[in-house]
Amino acid sequence: MLQKLRDKTSGWIASLILGLLIIPFAFVGVNEYMTGGAASDVAVVEAPPTWWESAPQWWPVSMLWQREEVTVDEFRAAFEQLRQQQRQAQGEAFDSREFESADNKRKVLEQLIDQKVLALASTRAGIRIGDAAVQKAISSEPAFQVAGKFSPEQYQMLLASQVPPVSPLKFQEEQRDRLRMMLIPQAINDSDFFTAGEQARMWKLLGETRDISIALLPPVPEDTAPVSDADIKSWYDGHKDDFKQPESVALEYVEINANTLPAATTVDEAALRKRYEDEKSRFIAPEQRVVAHILIAADASADAATQKAAEQKAAALTQQAKGGADFAALARANSEDPGSKDSGGELPAFAKDGSMVKPFEDAAFAMQAGEIRGPVKSDFGYHVLQLREIKPGAGRTFEEVRDELMAEQAGSERERAYNELAGRVVNETLKNPTALAPAAQAVGLPLQKLGPFPRNAPVGIAASPAVLRAAFSETLVQDGTVSDPIEIAPNHSVVIRVSQHTPEQAQPLAQARDAVIAAVRADRRSKAAEAAANALVARLDKGESLATVAAAESLQFNEIPGMRRGIPMPTAEANEAIFAARRPAEGKATAGKVALGDGNYAVFTVNKVTDGDMAAMPEQERTMMQQQLSQMSGGIATQAYVDAMRKRFKVKVFEDRL
């Protein structure tokens, strides 16, 4: 058999076939080598090379096609940012489980894909962003400014405070990428415009006003007529979804609250003193220094000649300052730090805590008061320093902070006891996950009960959104297991178990009978109110004036001239109905009705329509409207561009990595 196989795989035809098979395997190997074989992206945007737009998609992507990736880290960072925004906006109502929905994840991913599409389109268009544009964007960022001017120290400090810290070089490249990505949308937006004719037509509609008359009908009396059994059954059969018994649960729970735990009865003086010594730095304000400086800027990437010229200038200024020249005047005339130049180079007092770049800080804390030193090199260039003041550190004695330490110690003891107790509860529930009573008995806490209650009417601890979500969660309801500790407040949590669950179900007619009768009567009353409104509209359509009808029927009546579109008067629904009514013919009025809620109605007539007139709009408002319409149109055009690019590019999404 082996000999036959060897014979069949020899010869030029077999060699050709094997050679063709090797090619794709070779490319796969190259791709694995270049990417490391790791699944580090959740989406990829790919496009053929600009010099071969018709390159087939099956061609080895890593060799020819251009690509942008949405990495897992990028997606997680964007998703977490949205989570924080939603949590801040919704407060306690924020549901982390609901937020983790596939729709939310896809929404974030689609935004990131659009950004990558723009980035790839910019690359293919040959867009480049120069250093000057990057520096201008950074220096104009308000967060990096002091007194309205760019401050290198503020810039450095903010980048260093990020988690993890961001180097200036990395931040500059991030800004370069952002500017490159935004150049096409900005160009589309800036080039879009609204003509004067389009704006006039838009304002003719948006600026339209209507002169109306409106009358409020009196409430229809309560319906007290009998409701037959046949009507009851007919209404119940047709509206069964309105008469459902909501899902409800009953709970048993154990409450763990640090505030109810016994406080320590004795104070360990030695422990307090040890705590004071261990944490003494908390009670001592560090030494600070007030420094004035002159900055001769020279970027770290500048050439040797530029660096040398800056150093020589700083050295010359150092000699002038040491020779008695006014340091503040030298700073105003020569310093290139816009944040301190106008104040004679003086900076706010700072401690040796990394708030300044290290060479600057080291030099400042090695100087004596009044000393002048320079040149001192940093990432920003060369500095000339003058130490103007040393502010010594000051501390508080043990006796001064004893009460504070004692309160902290008591809080720590209570927190430790709380954590120990919570841990014991968890350990006990792990022994018997479907019963809470043994755990309560083992730790000496009472087993409490709550409910039954529906989701829309929580009581007691269930008023906490976190507890309510857990109480109706699929895991606790179906499995009957004990929950993990659920935090209600700091050092205050509960462990719950669903002891009874009643799913949503239709109420039997006998139980829903009173509600059905009330619904039938409410429907009768609503229909009677609508019929009364229709009758008045019919009279108005025949030519009677609303003022006359209102006087005859003793209705509350108002004339409202110049009503604007979108004004909630008397309600938003009423305004919408009034502007949906047809224009009245010359010398006539258009009648209509609108429901105001609670079975009440109003009737109205549109007596006159006045179109919006651009000529009457102030120039400033006209210009503002033009800008808003252009921005709106530009946004639509930009999205259309992105959508068109997405159709030209190849977008692959890896749902399993979200």
Image (spheres, rainbow, N blue to C red):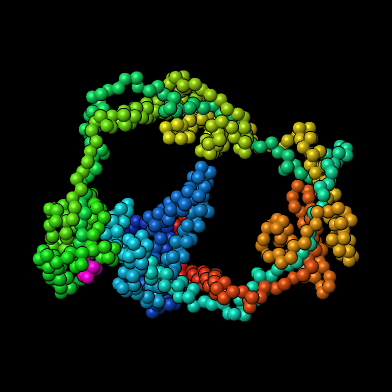
Q: Is residue 480 above or below residue 562?
A: above
The one of 569 and 8 positioned closer to us in this rendering: 569
Residue ID at (53%, 54%): 103
Q: Is residue 385 left or right of residue 343?
A: left
Q: In the shown orientation, is residue 571 left or right of residue 480?
A: right
Magenta highlight on residue 489 = no
Please provide the residue range marked out in magenta. 331-336
Q: Nearer the viewer, residue 494 or 550?
A: 550
Residue 220 position in % (x across, y down): 83, 46
Does residue 333 belong to the magenta stretch? Answer: yes
Instruction: Decide if residue 323 is on the left or right side of residue 231.
Output: left
- Apparent side of residue 512 relative to residue 358 in the rendered image (left or right): right
Q: Is residue 490 visible?
A: yes
**Residue placed most toward the observer, 226 or 388:** 388
Query: In which quadrant of the rendered view does residue 241 lie?
Result: top right
In percent of width and height, residue 386 lies at: 16, 59
Report the predominant secondary structure element of the magenta stretch.
helix
